[in-house]
Image (cartoon, rainbow, N blue to C red):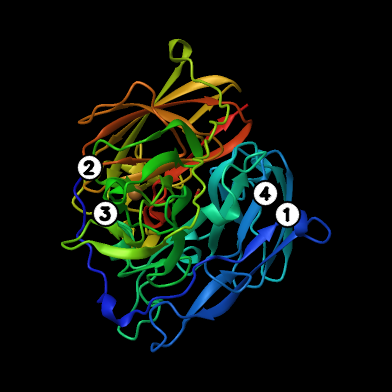
Amino acid sequence: MKMTRRTFLNATAATVALSAAPVSLDVSKASDDVLEINARPAQQRLYSPDHPPSDLWTYNGSAPGPEIRVKRGQRVRVRLTNGLEEPTSIHWHGIRIDNSMDGVSGLTQDPVMPGESFEYDFVAPDAGTYWYHAHNRSWNQVARGLYGAFIVEEDIPAFDREHDLTLVVDDWLLDRRGVLNVASLGSMMEWSHGGRLGNWLTVNGESQPSLNLSSGEAYRIRLINAANARILEIDPNRFDAKVIAYDGQALPQPETLAYAPLLIGPAQRVDLLIRPSGPGVIPIEEISGDRPYAFANLQIADSENPNPQVPKLYPNELPEPDLSQAKHVRLDMTGGAMGIMVETVYQGRKLGRRDFARTGQVWAFNGIANLAEEPLFRCRRGETIVVETINRTAFPHAMHIHGHHFRVIGRSGSSVREQNPWRDTFLIGPDQTTRIAFVADHPGKWLFHCHMLEHAAAGMNTWFEVT
Ligand code: C2O
Ligand code: CU
């Protein structure tokens, strides 16, 4: 995959934070069983204590917002109150949810207007690592900080809280003062190229935090990529970690990766299992640049009597696609800088090259930019769908299907394993073709889009309907 080189700011200005534990909201501890989430502006330092704070948009005053923790099968009620100056809504990314609760402004609900509230009420069917984020003008709202972790615990949590660490990684574009660059939001350069790429990584809103671990004990590290467009590259073998889940769904067995780097696209999650053998510092590095960049450090202390148990995860039960009866759909991706531009229709009208500045539309799926009257396809509930995606653009993309997990069953230029993991977002490189399969088992209108949020805004957005 061709990648843009990383150019992060000089790391020396940052200081090591003491702890990066996010605030958490536990449903069982909510007073009337309703979690309150207020979307509102707040100031937060992103770079170093010596630099001014940034004006962010937050859930309950911080980015990321509170980590929401629920139990599998438990009813979740969240009251979103909009304290912003523009409409918003919350999408529960990766959760196989009832369509009316999916949070897509303009498709599954009306956006929540400034000063108003909306109550989400749903059950999370699968244990695992998910996240929630704004889903109205996401390229703007997520870039400003509207996201948080959503953790669904197993019936009996596999790891206790001390051994269960969430790392929400974001890639911010800071200006020379170390402050969020707001002026460049919506720049056509970002929309037509690789999306908004930042120059500073934070973990749970902090710069290069240290996490305290004990040697000889097993930890679960939940990595969530909350960036608008940055693909993170890590090598779990550098710190003896195994992969135990992708996009929330546990693997049957912990897996030692036979290749590197592991790419974590925007919106993707990877859960790692790590059992440090001795005291010391283990950096978790992003390795796409010329030099590895430690975005977090694990401080390992000697443990007197380590607990030798390595907890086991059990995969959720998902409906297995039946390829012999599948409905086949093709998705041709075109457009963008240096890409093929086919005749493109936007809101029922043909677009000319010069319409780009007016509409902001520069990418297309099957020659259509953004949501059309007609869906990409309609299907019956329970049908197996195979989508063949052909990337005819010069950029990689991170394609996300709402409401369903799928298996990648074919990918040009790389071997696909026998048993492919479930995912809700797949990466596709320039000139690559990828086939995914899933059972469309939730009725409703579902979004299918690139999670590089500028690409989605600029046309890479479609929908399908399950009846
Ligand atoms: Cu995580 Cu449509 O998004
Ligand atoms: Cu894209």
**Which residue is rendered at x = 41% and y = 51% of the image?**
456
Which of 187 and 215 lies nearest the eye of the viewer?
215
CA separation in Å, label 4 and label 3: 48 Å
CA separation in Å, label 1 and label 4: 6 Å
Q: Which residue is mark 4?
A: 70
Q: Earlier in the sequence, mark 4 or mark 2?
A: 4
CA separation in Å, label 4 and label 2: 38 Å
Which secondary structure lies at badge 4? strand
Q: Which residue is mark 3?
A: 353
Q: Earlier in the sequence, mark 1 or mark 4?
A: 1
**Which residue is rendered at x = 52% and y = 69% of the image?**
63
Q: Quadrant of the N terminus?
A: top left
Which secondary structure lies at badge 1? helix
Q: Which residue is mark 1?
A: 27
Q: Residue furthest right?
A: 32
Residue 48's place in the image compared with 132, above or below, is below
| Mark 4 residue type | Val
Specify few, some or many for label 1: CA neighbours under 10 Å numbering under 14, 14-19, or 20 or more. Answer: many
Q: Which residue is mark 2?
A: 430
Q: Earlier in the sequence, mark 3 or mark 1?
A: 1
Determine whether label 1 and label 4 are within 8 Å by CB. yes
CA separation in Å, label 3 and label 1: 50 Å
| Mark 3 residue type | Arg
**Which residue is rendered at x = 21% and y = 52% of the image?**
3
Specify few, some or many for label 4: CA neighbours under 10 Å numbering under 14, 14-19, or 20 or more. Answer: many
| Mark 2 residue type | Pro
Specify few, some or many for label 3: CA neighbours under 10 Å numbering under 14, 14-19, or 20 or more. Answer: few
Which x, y percent locates residue 80? 69, 61
Please state which of the two labelled residues, at mark 2 or mark 1, is closer to the viewer.
Answer: 1
Which x, y percent locates residue 222? 47, 51
Please state which of the two labelled residues, at mark 4 or mark 2, is closer to the viewer.
Answer: 4
